[in-house]
Image (cartoon, grey):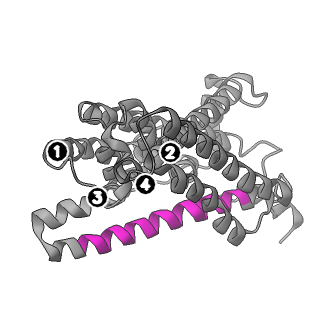
């Protein structure tokens, strides 16, 4: 393989370890301090089992909405959706966003029924056992554990692979170091601490998305405007047309591959929502009057993440494939 085909990390390994360990322990330390203030100056004590596991069932819709956006923003939400945009064109991020929003919208009804009929539950497995018996309880326990293993593996490996690509940090080390800071603030602060961190994660995520959008469509020297992006994508469609897209265009929604990708995303996403205790836990923790509002807002807010991020970066990469500065190792794709 020639040297120009080797992807070289932009930052040093030290930066990777510093970010993973430093940012993780920064959030952990911040949440420990906030938990102390909460315990000292409010009626919510993390030492209480109800507060620790369900945040006293009093969380307002804003934090629930941020929690949903943060929980459903996997590594694939950013990486796979961008790949879909690069490969299929505009339909890729659209179908990825639709494929995740539908499940959240449907789960809104489930969340409302939890507050109406099982407001004292702590997990969805409790509800399954009471309603369907021990056999179904054991079956759904297996599904729930399997789902969480897959989700955790996806998040850890996706995050570790991203850090590795940027800094060259060892992937195994990243997989072990990333969860440590999270475990610390959860142990000390319980479920409410995760909502506050979800809010901060969501805030940072949207700031990053805005920066990418303004840079790509506003100040970039090689794109700089929606018109320039359109023209570059038209040229890309002629140079490397997409099989199955109308006229090979990256700007059409009439895409056979995009439609198949959307169907797969929709079907696979149901298991990721309905078998993941995290989404049930947010319904349990929410204040009764805010559950439906929070989940609907969460679904709509999350849609903008893959749609804006991927349609910006994925299509920008495809538009710049003929640029002389574009990495030659990716031009063959």
Q: Which residue is mark 1?
A: 113
Q: Which residue is mark 3?
A: 123
In the rendered view, tell whether residue 268 sits above or below residue 198.
below
Say whether residue 61 is magenta.
no
Q: Nearer the viewer, residue 51 or 94?
A: 51
Overall secondary structure of the magenta section: helix
In the rendered view, tell whether residue 321 sits above or below residue 221.
below
Under circle 3, the secondary element is: loop
Q: CA distance from mark 1 to mark 4?
A: 37 Å
Of the two numbered discs 2 and 4 on the same chain, state the one appearing first in sequence.
2
Quarter of the image for the N terminus: give it.
Answer: bottom right
Q: CA distance from mark 1 to mark 3?
A: 14 Å
Percent x, y of residue 59: 37, 36
Q: CA distance from mark 4 to mark 3?
A: 38 Å
Asked if residue 26 lies left or right of residue 278, the reply is right
Q: Residues within 10 Å of mark 1 (few under 14, many from 20)?
A: some
Q: CA distance from mark 2 to mark 4?
A: 41 Å
Q: CA distance from mark 2 to mark 1?
A: 25 Å
Q: Nearer the viewer, residue 328 or 271?
A: 271
Foreground label between 1 and 4 = 1
Percent x, y of residue 179: 60, 61
Under circle 4, the secondary element is: helix
Of the two numbered discs 2 and 1 on the same chain, state the one appearing first in sequence.
1
What residue is at 50 percent from the left and 45 percent from the top?
193
Q: CA distance from mark 3 to mark 2?
A: 18 Å
Say whether residue 152 is magenta.
yes
What residue is at 24 percent from the left and 30 percent from the top?
289
Extent of the magenta region: 139-163
Could you say which disc has been placed on residue 193 in the image? 2
Q: Which residue is mark 4?
A: 257
Quarter of the image for the C terminus: give it.
Answer: bottom right
């Amino acid at each position: 393989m020639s040297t120009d085909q080797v992807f070289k990390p932009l930052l040093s390994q030290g930066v990777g370890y510093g970010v993973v360990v430093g940012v993780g322990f920064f959030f952990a330390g911040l949440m420990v301090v906030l938990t102390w203030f909460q315990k000292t100056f409010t009626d919510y004590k993390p030492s209480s089992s109800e507060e620790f596991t369900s945040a006293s069932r009093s969380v307002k819709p804003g934090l629930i909405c941020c929690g949903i956006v943060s929980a459903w923003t996997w590594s694939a939400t950013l990486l796979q959706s961008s790949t879909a945009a690069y490969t299929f064109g505009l339909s890729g991020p659209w179908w990825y966003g639709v494929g995740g929003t539908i499940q959240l919208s449907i789960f809104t009804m489930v969340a409302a029924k939890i507050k109406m009929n099982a407001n004292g539950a702590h997990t969805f497995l409790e509800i399954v056992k009471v309603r369907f018996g021990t056999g179904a309880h054991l079956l759904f326990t297996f599904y729930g554990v399997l789902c969480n293993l897959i989700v955790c593996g996806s998040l850890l490996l996706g995050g570790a692979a991203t850090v590795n690509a940027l800094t060259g940090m060892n992937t195994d080390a990243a997989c072990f170091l990333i969860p440590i800071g999270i475990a610390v603030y959860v142990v000390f602060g319980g479920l409410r601490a995760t909502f506050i961190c979800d809010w901060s994660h969501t805030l940072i995520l949207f700031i990053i998305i805005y920066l990418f959008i303004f840079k790509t469509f506003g100040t970039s020297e090689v794109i700089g405007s929606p018109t320039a992006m359109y023209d570059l994508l038209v040229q890309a469609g002629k140079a490397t047309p997409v099989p199955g897209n109308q006229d090979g265009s990256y700007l059409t929604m009439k895409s056979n591959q995009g439609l198949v990708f959307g169907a797969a995303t929709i079907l696979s996403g149901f298991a990721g929502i309905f078998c993941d205790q995290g989404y049930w836990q947010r319904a349990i923790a929410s204040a009764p009057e805010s559950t439906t509002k929070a989940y609907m807002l969460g679904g709509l807010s999350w849609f903008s993440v893959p749609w804006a991020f991927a349609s910006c970066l994925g299509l920008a990469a495809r538009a710049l494939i003929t640029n002389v500065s574009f990495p030659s190792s990716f031009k063959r794709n």
